[in-house]
Amino acid sequence: MAFTLKIGESAPGFNLPATDGKSYALNDFSESELLVLFFTCNHCPYVIGSDEVTRKTVGKYTDQSISFVAINSNSVNTYSVDSFDHMVTRMEEFKFPWVYLHDETQSIAREYGALKTPHFYVFNKDRALVYIGRATDSPRDASGIRVHDLERALDEIMAGEEVSVPVTNPIGCNVKWDGKDAHWMPADACDLV
């Protein structure tokens, strides 16, 4: 069995604490036509380099029925800056327009098969996976972006079309698994395409 969710598979449930002091479950976003869920963190240069691009993407779809939810699953034992307290501080400083959840046990990262930070998943109204992979082809340096895979997928879905490229390889740092080397990947993890 592959490590990462496949197109058509259902979003695994979750109930995780957020930086706004609340906890959120998958069904808390049931009113939205689409759910964009992405695994991220506080320290990764690919995340830091792409956060403002992601902010612009969220802004582009403000009047659409799309929820954006970020999850930090990185082990605090690998990078202390990925702690929940640092998540709260980062959200207070940058005021990102998404919900930021903490997956301390890393169980949700395993259920979704998160490979990198950032790693994007788009689920339709039935919460079946319709796109997985990267947001752009240059997350670390926005000046090099030639392809915006996430926005292309969202535009196609909102237009009632099939996603033309439903799977791309995420670009970023490995998820930092607790007790493992910072570059460790699960044995059954592999490129998506």
Image (tube, rainbow, N blue to C red):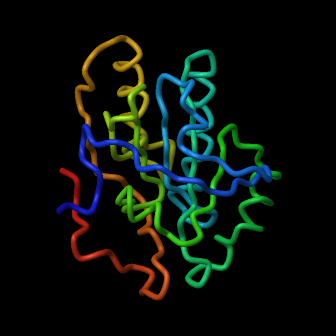
**Residue 44 sits in quarter:** bottom right
Q: Nearer the viewer, residue 93 or 72?
A: 72
> What residue sits 56% from the left and 39% below the top?
54
Residue 55 percent location from the top left of the image:
62, 37
Report x, y in % for residue 52.
Answer: 62, 42
Q: Residue at x 55, y 55 (%)?
A: 47
Q: Position of residue 159 (x, y in %)?
A: 37, 11
Determine the residue located farthest toward the top in the rendered image.
Answer: 159
Between 21 and 170, the one lying in front of the other is 21
The residue depicted at 27 percent of the width and 26 percent of the height is 163
* Quadrant of residue 155 within the rendered picture: top left
**Residue 13 falls left or right of residue 159:** right
Count of number-bearing discs: 0
Q: Is residue 143 above or below residue 192?
A: above
Task: Tell whether 24 sits left or right of 164.
Answer: right
> On the rendered image, what quadrant is the N terminus found in?
bottom left
Q: Is residue 148 above or below residue 184?
A: above
Indicate the position of residue 29 as horizontal and vertical percent values.
57, 34
Find residue 164 and report its image quarter.
top left
Residue occupying image coordinates x 68% and y 72%: 83
Viewer-nearest residue: 24 or 123: 24
Image vertical order of residue 7 relative to residue 153, above or below: below
Residue 164, compared with residue 120, is above or below; it is: above
In this view of the protein, which residue sits in the foreground, 105 or 40?
105
